[in-house]
Amino acid sequence: MPGEITETPCLERAAAVAYLHRFQDRIMLHWVLPEDMLSDQRVTVRFRLSQDGNVVAWKLRSWTSRRIANSVELAFRHATSAGPIPDPAACLVDRAVEMQFENPY
């Protein structure tokens, strides 16, 4: 319909994308990749964040090896908040988000 305003989906909003990048950086600070890990290893995690940026729930969705899954799990347990979710990214609060972690080498 002409003139209709459609809302940008949450995960396409610049503020939400920027916040998720900061969140991923926090996880990466705590991620210790197991030695001798093959280059094609990856893990997908589904999680929810509270308004203060803390993980309120998370679950490993898929993984290529248990070793890399364990390492990402430890990173999630030890990571700290990326700070409060700003108003322009408020759609992230309590929303299920999936993120993939891959062996960067």
Image: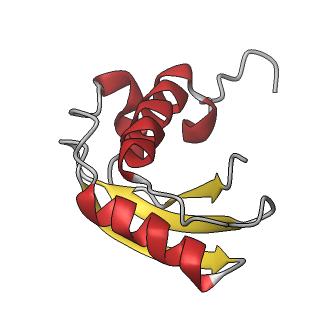
Judge by depth and name the residue closer to the eye, 50 or 36.
Answer: 36
Where residue 2 sits, quadrant-wise, is: top right
Judge by depth and name the residue closer to the eye, 13 or 19.
Answer: 19
Left or right, 101 with respect to 4, comes to left
Percent across and percent down for residue 8 are 62, 30
Q: Is residue 13 above or below residue 50?
A: above
Judge by depth and name the residue closer to the eye, 54 or 33.
Answer: 33
The residue furthest bottom is 66
Q: What is the quadrant of the N terminus in the image? A: top right
Going 51% across and 66% down the picture, which residue do you hit? Answer: 46
Left or right, 35 with respect to 27, comes to right
Q: Is residue 67 above or below residue 74?
A: below
The residue furthest top is 3
- Is residue 9 in sight in this rendering? no
Going 65% across and 22% down the picture, which residue do you hit? Answer: 5
Q: Is residue 88 above or below residue 60?
A: above
Percent across and percent down for residue 73 are 41, 71
Left or right, 85 with respect to 98, comes to left
- Is residue 26 in sight in this rendering? yes
Going 73% across and 47% down the picture, which residue do you hit? Answer: 105
Left or right, 4 with respect to 7, comes to right
Where residue 25 sits, quadrant-wise, is: top left
Percent across and percent down for residue 11 are 59, 39
Percent across and percent down for residue 66 are 59, 84
Where residue 9 sits, quadrant-wise, is: top right
Q: Is residue 102 above or below residue 19?
A: below
- Way the structure is coloured: secondary structure
Going 47% across and 42% down the picture, which residue do you hit? Answer: 24
